[in-house]
Image: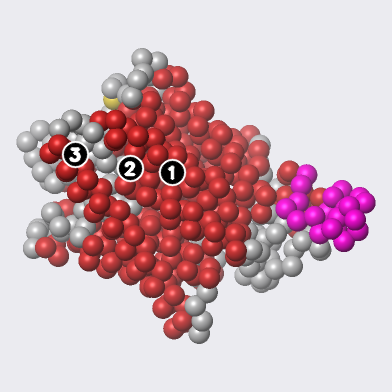
Amino acid sequence: MEYALQAWMLASASLVLLMTTPALALFYGGMSRSKSVLNMMMMSFSAAGVVGLVYVLWGWSMTYGTQDVALLFSNPFELFGLRNVEGATYLTVGFQLTFAVITAALISGAVADRLKFSAWLLFVPLWVTLSYFPLAHMVWGGGFLSGAQNGLADLVFSGDGGAAVAPVDYAGGTVVHINAGVAGLVLALLLGRRIGFGKEPMKPHNLTLTMLGAGLLWFGWFGFNVGSWVPGDLTGDAMGQYWLDETSLVWLNTTVATCAAIVGWLVVEKIRDGHATSLGAASGVVAGLVAITPACGALSPLGAIALGIVAGVACALAVGLKYRWNYDDSLDVVGVHLVGGLIGTVAIGVLSTSGGIAYGHSPKLLVVQAAVALFAVLWSAVATLVVGLVVKAIVGLRVHEDDEVEGIDGVEHGESAYDLVGARSGGLGGSKHLAGSTHVSEGV
C-alpha cells in the first residue's frame, strides 16, 4: 500500500505540472490577442522555471519548516536548498512545488498585453516569498489559518489546545485561488487598463487553444485535488480502504461540480446574451474546478453539484464587473479565481457534511471559513501591493505605449506566434517584418 500511494503522489505531481505547462499556457494563450499569445504562454513557462528553483531553495523551508515565526511562516534558512531533506519526502516537496508554480502562473491572466517580461520575472519570486509561502504555511503548515493553538479559528472559537472548529481547505481555495485572484486584481490596478479597453474589441484570438487548455486543466486537476490527501500512516488494509473511500469521493465531487458549473455558466449566457459560447463552456470548467478545490473532501456529491451550479452562475456574472467598475482584469482571473475561490471556501460552512449548517450544524464552521477567506484576501492584497511597488521602482511595470500597440510578442520576445507574412511571401524576410507588425496578426 505504501508504494502504491507513493506512485500515485508521483503521478499527481506530474498532473499538476501539466496544469501549468501546457494546460494553463494554452488556456490563457487562446484567450489572448494574437499579438500577445506567446508572451502569455511565456509567463506560464517562466513561472515554472523561477518558482521551481525558489521553492527548492527556500519555499519548502518557509512552508513546512519546524522553526515557526509567529504562525505566519517558517524560517527560510532552516531547510534552505532542502538541507536535511531526503527519501520519500522529496515526493511531497515535488508535489507542493507544482502548486506554487501554478498559483503564480494564474496571476498572469490579469495583466495580458502590457506587463514587462522583466517585471514579471522579478515579481514572481518576490510574490511567492511574501504571499504564497506564508499563506501555504498558515493553512497547510500548521500556521495561523489552520486549527493550531492561537490560530485564527482558535481565537474565534477557542478549544483545548487548538481550534474547536478547524478551517477546511482541502487543496487550495485560499492558498491558491483567493491568493492568485487578489494578486491579479492588485497588479491589474497598478498597471492600469490596456489601451482601448472598453472601447475596442479584445476578443480571444484562438478559442480552440482555450478549449484544449480547459480540457487539460480538468484532467490535471485530478492530481491537484485527488492527490492532496495521503494518510500519515501508509500501512494496513484498513488505512488503504479509507484512502480509497476518501479519494473516490474527491474524484467524483471534482467531476460533478465541474459539470454543474459548465451548465450554470451556459444557462447564464443563453438567458443574458441569447447564445451559449465555447468560451463560456471552457470558463465554466475552470470556475467549477476552482470552487470545488477547497471543498472536494467535505461535501456529498449532491452538495458538489449545488456548489458547481452556484459557482458557474456567479462567476459568469462576475466577469462582467470589470466593465462596470472599470478595472482591466484581462482574462478574468478575478471573476473566476477570486470569486470562485471565495464561494468554494465559504460554502464549506454551509454544505459540509460534518459541520455545515445545511446538515443541522451550528454556524461556527461558516464563521471560521469566512474569517479565513477574509484574512487571505487582506494578506494577499498587502503582499502584492508591496511587491508590485518594489518592482515598479526597480524596473517599471508597463511596456511603452507604442510597444503595447505594436504587440508585446515582438517587442518583448522578438517573435510572433503566426508568421502569416512568411507564409504568403514564401518566407523571404517575413519573420523580420512580422516581429514589428500588428496589422497582419491582430484581427480581433
Q: Does residue 425 show up?
A: yes
Q: Observer-nearest residue: 3 or 13?
A: 3
Q: Do the residues labelled 2 and 3 touch (CB within 8 Å)?
A: no
Q: Is residue 423 magenta?
A: yes
The dot on residue 429 is: none
For residue 375, above or below residue 84: below
Q: Where on the picture, by quarter, is residue 84?
A: top left
For residue 212, above or below residue 379: below
Q: Which numbered disc flags the more N-terminal residue, 2 or 3?
A: 2
Q: Where on the picture, by quarter, is residue 138?
A: top left
| Element carrying mark 2 | loop
Residue that numbered label 2 is attached to: 227
Residue that numbered label 3 is attached to: 240
Q: Does residue 174 show up?
A: no
Task: Specify the quadrant that holds the N terminus.
Answer: top left
Q: Is residue 308 left or right of residue 409?
A: left
